[in-house]
Image (spheres, rainbow, N blue to C red):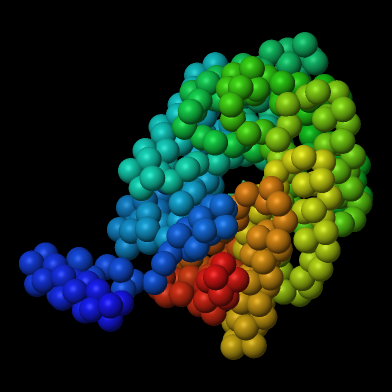
């Protein structure tokens, strides 16, 4: 009986292929990372950046393999408010439009950060009162603009030092530590539905810096401040070792009722890459994927772009690179297959 049915299905498929051509055999293609992640109720995403969007093969893979994208630069303060009170959302909009066409969701990145600020903001002194007005207006104008278009915001980016003390930024210096709660409240007013995250690097392991976020999260929750998740950037490097406490760390935030996400994943190495380094890298990509899947409320993983062609690493770390699961020719590396295995 079953055999007969299979035969009928097979014959139908053959007819379909004959009628419609090769497109009808698309089911032979392997499932995408997004498909596989969705089976676990997670997303699998990539960052992208506006200048790359003229690269058709790149855009094609970006649109097919992932179900989430993050603008690498286009929503940052220097891009969105280049002059005080003059807003320009064209770069972020371009990425949101692309995401919409590809049925992808967008993480907003980032509202409050000490880096990539416009000169008008950094080039003068502000009183606390003045800066509060400027900060509130920036946050609320941008969040309102993207209301319903982004599902989460990195509200405050990289607020702590390695030892867990507050980073000395224009916002901390002028407004004190309360700027974080204020930023979250202002963002929430502007879009009550969007998920609000702080986001940082070197907080994958349990240690002074991730402890600072843990304490802050507890405090903010106790005070009723709108806070929904913690973003762990996960810019890893082979020479520093795998963050073995990642899963436990994700779990402690989950126990506070918070989401977690791996928001900017890459795993760099000293060049040249070789088989052994690429194998270790692959193992780490698999391990961090498994860690996220193992923890409730770890909602998804975002690569900090998916191909070595557009990685930020070589420009920032001399002699390092090869950090992403696709190489410079957009060919999948061992890391890609390791992620697939972990998602299966
Ligand atoms: O990917 C971004 C790169 O194009 C920029 O030149 C760089 C400037 O600092 O910022 C990169 O993205 C950063 C992200 O916004 C926050 N976490 C660290 C990322 C890598 O620097």
Q: Residue at x 91, y 51 (%)?
A: 208
**201 lies above or below 335:** above
Is 172 left, or right, of 17 in this rendering?
Answer: right
Q: Residue at x 41, y 57 (%)?
A: 62
Is 157 left, or right, of 324 in this rendering?
Answer: right
Residue 46: image location, x then y, percent: 51, 55
Quadrant in the picture for the N terminus: bottom left
Residue toward you, 3 or 55: 3
**153 lies above or below 179:** below
Q: Quadrant of residue 130?
A: top right
Is 86 left, or right, of 22 in this rendering?
Answer: right
Q: Is residue 210 visible?
A: yes
Q: Residue furthest front?
A: 1
**188 lies above or below 215:** above
Quadrant in the picture for the C terminus: bottom right
Residue 342: image location, x then y, percent: 60, 71
Q: Residue at x 77, y 57 (%)?
A: 204
Is 21 left, or right, of 83 in this rendering?
Answer: left
Q: Quadrant of residue 57?
A: bottom left
Q: Residue at x 65, y 38 (%)?
A: 154
């Amino acid at each position: 009986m079953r055999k007969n049915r299979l035969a009928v299905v097979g014959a139908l498929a053959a007819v379909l292929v004959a009628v419609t051509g090769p497109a009808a055999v698309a089911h032979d293609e392997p499932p995408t990372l997004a498909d596989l992640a969705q089976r676990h109720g997670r997303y699998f995403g990539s960052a992208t950046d506006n200048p790359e969007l003229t690269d058709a093969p790149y855009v094609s893979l970006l649109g097919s393999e992932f179900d989430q994208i993050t603008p690498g630069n286009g929503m940052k303060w220097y891009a969105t408010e280049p002059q005080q009170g003059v807003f320009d959302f064209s770069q972020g909009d371009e990425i949101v439009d692309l995401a919409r066409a590809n049925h992808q969701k967008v993480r907003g990145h980032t509202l409050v950060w000490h880096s990539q600020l416009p000169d008008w903001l950094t080039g003068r002194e502000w009183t606390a009162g003045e800066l509060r007005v400027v900060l509130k207006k920036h946050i609320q104008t941008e969040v309102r603009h993207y209301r319903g278009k982004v599902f989460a915001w990195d509200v405050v980016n990289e607020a702590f030092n390695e030892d867990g003390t507050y980073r000395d930024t224009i916002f901390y210096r002028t407004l004190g530590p309360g700027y974080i709660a204020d930023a979250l409240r202002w963002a929430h007013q502007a879009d009550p539905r969007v998920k609000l995250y702080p986001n940082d690097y070197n907080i994958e392991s349990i240690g002074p810096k991730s402890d600072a976020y843990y304490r802050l999260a507890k405090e903010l929750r106790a005070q009723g401040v709108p806070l929904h998740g913690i973003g762990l950037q996960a810019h890893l490097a082979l020479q520093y070792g795998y963050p073995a406490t990642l899963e436990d760390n994700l779990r402690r935030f989950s126990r506070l009722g918070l989401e977690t996400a791996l928001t900017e994943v890459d795993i760099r190495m000293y060049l040249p890459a070789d088989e052994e380094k690429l194998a270790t890298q692959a193992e780490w990509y698999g391990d961090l994927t498994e860690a996220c899947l193992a923890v409730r409320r770890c909602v998804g993983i975002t690569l900090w772009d998916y191909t070595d062609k557009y990685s930020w690493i070589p420009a920032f770390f001399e002699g390092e690179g090869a950090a992403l699961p696709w190489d410079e020719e957009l060919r999948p590396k061992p890391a890609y297959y390791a992620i697939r295995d972990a998602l299966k």
